[in-house]
Amino acid sequence: MSEALFKSFAIVGAGPHIGIPIVKVSISPILVIARPTSTNTSALPADDPNLKVVRADYTSASEVSAILRENKVDVLISTVTLVFGGVLVQNILADAAKEAGVKLFVPSEFGTAPPASGLSHEKYDFAVYTKSIGLPTLHVYNGLFNEFVPWLTALTETGKLHLVGKGEMPGSFTAIPDVAGYLAHILTTQPPSRLLDVEVRIEGQRATLLEIIALYKGSVPVVHCDAVPTEGVVAVEVRTLLQQRFEIGGASCGWNPETGSDDAELARKDNLLWEGHRWLTVGEVLGL
Ligand SMILES: NC(=O)c1ccc[n+]([C@@H]2O[C@H](COP(=O)([O-])OP(=O)(O)OC[C@H]3O[C@@H](n4cnc5c(N)ncnc54)[C@H](OP(=O)(O)O)[C@@H]3O)[C@@H](O)[C@H]2O)c1
């Protein structure tokens, strides 16, 4: 295997949460492949000579493949949505990548190791699929984005922190700029042998939900509940299931869904690939 560093990068599903931050951290040159209907492209930096935007139908392997081949893409990053069904079209994107000779596919993960059934099992199924077609992958596990605490607890919509369960089990939290910066750093500094068919586990901060709630110092009401409230809140089931995952330790990057066990050292084992980096805390990101 050649150990020459990867040179050419593309991204599919560049949305506001993690995709666009990855584009902005200057992995360059980078090609953004957006769907014909995407309006997210308007949030991309204008006049960046290292950024090119093309449009393609994600459900057409031949269309995506032709673009990847034409642009000699080494690494295809996917940040397609899980909640709205994007992960399900990744098989087509994988077929396109394989056909075009892409060397590494970074699937839309950015959480914790997915289980074979239940919430985010589509990510597990995709890992099985890429293995079956022999497409090398790099899975990034970072826990919950620090920025998503108000979303997880429905604080954003209700003005109250909703805690499902006791909130006593530690989970992993990593800020979006740290996840994006980390991915850019390792893709541009690590040799292919360190990245191919690898799971990287990073953790900016390890904390329980009770510890995170304590950061608010009583400034907002806390509601103990069995489920995130439905009124005026979208994707409540996902939020409730995620908090239930916290309850069993499954929100830690050291979580092993097969054994049901957590390993605090494993949770941050790949932080060291970004030597000297200072990781943002939840308090810093949320201004608490
Ligand atoms: N750890 C965390 O706290 C956390 C939080 C949020 C998300 N995540 C993870 O990050 C990844 C990206 O999620 P996100 O929230 O950033 O996604 P998002 O912003 O909702 O969507 C990302 C992109 O998905 C594409 N897309 C939307 N619907 C699609 C469909 N039906 N088929 C194919 N593509 C579709 C769109 O691409 P176009 O622009 O081309 O239309 C969109 O820009 C997911 O794996 C998610 O689980 C993690």
Image (cartoon, grey):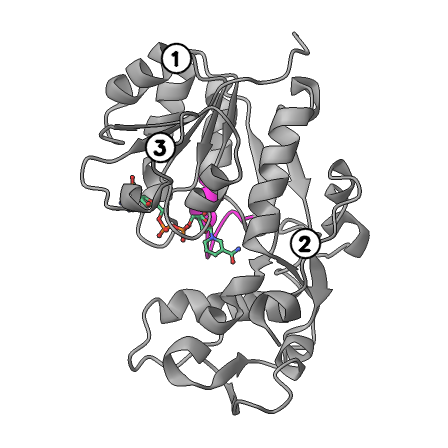
Q: Nearer the viewer, residue 94 or 32?
A: 32
Q: Residue 189 at what x, y percent from top left?
A: 68, 26
Query: Magenta segment: does it hold 198?
Result: no
Q: Decide: few, some or many residues near mark 2? Use Cα within 10 Å; few <14, some 14-19, many ≥20.
A: many
Residues at marks 3 and 2 touching, judged by CB atoms closer than 8 Å: no
The outermost residue toward the left is 37
Query: Magenta segment: does it hold 119?
Result: yes
Pointer 3 residue: 47
Pointer 2 residue: 255
Disc 3 to disc 2, C-alpha distance: 42 Å
Residue bounds of the magenta highlight: 114-125
For residue 207, say whether it is visible: yes
SS class of the residue under badge 3? loop
Pointer 1 residue: 100
Q: Is residue 210 above or below residue 220?
A: above
Residue type, label 1: Ala
